[in-house]
Every structure is written in C-alpha cells, then in structure tokens.
Amino acid sequence: MSVPSLRPSMVILSVLLSCAVRAAHAEPVWPSADPQVRHPEQFDPRRPLDQESHLSVADGFTLVLVGDMIIARPLTQAAPVPGFDDLLRLMRSSDATFGNLETTLIDIRRFRGAPYPFDGDWANIGLPQVAPDLKRMGVSIVGRANNHAMDWGLEGMRETGQHLDDAGIAYAGCGETAALARAPAYYESRRGRVALVAFATTFRPTTDARDPHGSAPGRAGLSAVHLSLRVHVRAAALAQLAAADCQLYQRSCGATPAALTLNGTSYVLDERDFNEYQIDRADLESIGRSIREARQHADLVIVAVHAHECSWDCEHGKPMVPGEFLKVLAHGAIDAGADVFAATGIHNLGPFEVYHGRPVFYGLANFFWSDIQEPVPGELFALNRPLLEQSYAHPERATDYDLTAPLNAASFATPYTFESVLAQVRFSGGRLAGVTLFPVALGYGETLRTSGTPRLERNPARAAAIFRQIQERTAAFGLAPLNYTVVRGAASVQVP
C-alpha cells in the first residue's frame, strides 16, 4: 500500500480523535470501603468506629492548596520577584500547605541512575536544595503521583524522597510497592493531623507501582488509577473509521459495525461524540481503603489526583476542561471520607464545586513553572531532531534551552499557562467555613530567571480575568454556578 494512499485515512483519523468532545456521564458505583459492622457488641461502646469518620481540626484551621510545582532551583534566596513574598506569607501563615511536586530532585554530580524521556517529553529535574527551600516557603505536604515521577528512574524517585524526608516535607503517591504508594502520608500541624492520599490517572508505562504476586516481586513506582478509553462517535464518523480500518488493515470492510478498534482505540456508535473514560474498579477499591484509613487516622483528609485526560479539544491551543470521570473520583473520594479533593495536570485553571460541604478543585493549574531544565538528556534531542532541524539553521549548536523554547512554543505559548490561583480553605465547627482564591501570575514573557516564579497578581483587570476562567469552566463542566465576591483583590467564594 503506497504512502500517498494512506494519508487521507490518517487525516480523517486525526480529525476524529481531536473531535471527541465530551466524557460520558455514566458513573460506576464507587465501591464502599466500609467493612460494615456485623455484631456491634464486638466493639467498645465508648470508641465507636464512626467517631473517627469526621473532620476534626481545630476551629479556624486554614489549608492552602497550590497546583503543579515544576521547580528547578531554590527561590527564596534568589533576586526578589515583586509579589512572591505575598504568596509566601499566605503559605507560611497557614496550618498546612499542599502542592503537587512534578519534578525529580537529584544531585546530578553524584547520581547513578539515568533519565527516561522515552516519549519526547521533558525529564524534569531540580536541585536537591529545592526541598529545604519549599519547606522555608511553608510547603508541608506534597503529592508525587504524576507522569514525571519516574523521569529519572527508580534512583531519581528514591533520591527525591530522601531529600523531602530530610527537609521534613511529607509526601504521598510514590513507594516501593503499590501498597506503599497508595498509603496516606501525614503532616502533624498544631491544629490537627493532616492526611494526604495521592494518585495519578496519567502516567508512563511501567511506572505504576505493583505489589508482589506469587513469586514475582513487586515494583516501585507511583499510585495509579487505570483508565480505559472508549470514543463515542456518530454514524458518519464511524463509517469513516470503518473505511480507514478496511483500507489499512482489511477489517470492517462490510457493513459499518456498531463498534471497532483502530490503532488501539475503541470506538462505539452513539448519537453524539464524546470520550468515555472507564475507571478500573480494583483501583477504586484500594484507593477507597486508603481514604478510609486516612480518615480514621487524621483530622483532615486531602485526596489529590494528577490527570491530563480532558473532556474535549485536548491540548489544541485552548484551555483544557478535565474529563467527566473526575467527578466520579471526586464525589467518591468525598463520600469515602475526604475533606478536600484537588486535581492537577491540565496546566490551566479548572472548574470548582462544593460537594456535600467539601471543596473540589478540578484544576489548580501551575504554581511553579521552571523553564530552567538542565541537564536535558541527549535522548530528548534525538527524539526531537526534526523539530530542531525545522527551528534552527544549525541544530547541532542547540543548547538545552534552545530545544526547550520550540517545545514550549508548540504546547505552552498561552497566557493561561502562566495564570493560577492560591486557594485558601478554612474550616470551623467541623465544616467548611470559607474558600478564598488569590490570583497568581507566573511572569509570562519574562526571562528564564523570573518567568515561572509565582507572584500575587495585583492588577485588578488581570485578576478578574483569572477568576472568570474558573467561573466559565465551572459552567462548562455542568456544575452549579460559581459565585464570589472580590475583596481586596481576592475572590471570596460563596459556600453553600
């Protein structure tokens, strides 16, 4: 089959993949983690199980949440960026501060592992000094389950954990086995014990942790929730897919089938186009047990997920709306005992809701966005050789950032990549008392030394635009309207 004859079919396939627009609303039942008491007389009446199932931090407890932290160097000792200290004051004055650490912290001079940028993506790297610097900023607990957790292999994962341990920052989402990766992490604050359960739906192959099975040992890695994708398409689109399947693989050559699989993706006939992400039930069961354990052992429980899967137009030059399956995860996590649900991964601000009196952040965007990524593995240059040849007259002269620049231009040349919020959540009387969103800018267009460093956005018009992003994406996600009042430059969210 000649190359020219393949091109129309592949173009059709590409267009159809980009047009799968919405995730399904079919929600699998979240398996209950409650073992269900059979004989109450077996328990101490003064210590009933349900007394451990409630939010119990001291009145006035304040939690700060930020998004993806891609940070390469210590910043508290760097030349001051106006507005950065304003955010640090909020973080330091909170009872606990959470963020997603999306990088590896290693001393490259002594490192004995290797990078694994097999898919052409960056192998994120930061200096070991980042860990104590985050501690100085007020960061107390971080999630590590994300698609960059294993950029530098098991050695990088382990060294990062050691630096965080030395700095006194608790973390969840990585471990030597699936059980350890699933396990809650705890931060002891003066106003209550905080637990974190962290997992990812977006991760690289074989980076998900596994438990031993028979005589096969377990595998270190991240806590993963596995998804399977089914793309629902209308009749005309399915007919085109069937034609491509026939032309390429001599299948689906008769009447248009009701379903087919092409290039590893399953398609089914429907009256509308949308992505359906099916969640692995066994993963839900184990995550549910981790949340129940965290609930029993902590005064406040955070559940965090790193997810790139989107509802429509994934990474096509406009903000991503997260996949509908996140509602299943968020609502199930809160029903299982979580007090806060936080999603990262889409690299822009996402929707927000209050579900059963608990805040749900469907996209906390970026908090640190360091374009100083060095060293860049040679493999990354090899995987992106066509891009370098297209971008430079002398690609052989390209430095690490000479490669980073066109990669960023292809995916992140958008103002919303550099806009975020710092979320402050307050609790009182065993319930949610308030949510305040502080607008954050990351210095889009500045030099590498300051770009990507967060600072409080003081311009009222730009701050208002940041808040509108959340409001609009909340509406697009089919949630209740986000109502807020701007007070002294911050959005005070109306909490039902």
Image (spheres, rainbow, N blue to C red):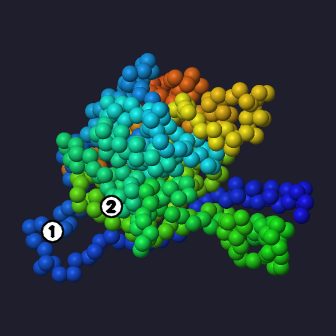
Kind of residue at badge 1? Pro
Q: Is residue 345 above or below residue 408?
A: below
| Numbered label attached to residue 73 | none
Q: Position of residue 255 (x, y in %)?
A: 81, 79
Of tags 2 and 1, which is closer to the observer? 2
Q: Is residue 385 above or below residue 307?
A: above
Give the structural element (helix, strand or loop) at label 1.
Answer: loop
Q: Position of residue 25 (x, y in %)?
A: 54, 66
Residue tagged 2:
291
Q: Nearer the viewer, residue 161 or 346?
A: 161
Q: Nearer the viewer, residue 420 or 165?
A: 165
Q: Residues within 10 Å of mark 1 (few under 14, many from 20)?
A: few
Q: Position of residue 367 (x, y in %)?
A: 46, 36
Q: Identify the residue shown where x is 48% and y is 58%.
A: 208
Figure quadrant of the N terminus? bottom right
Mark yes or no: residue 126 visible.
no
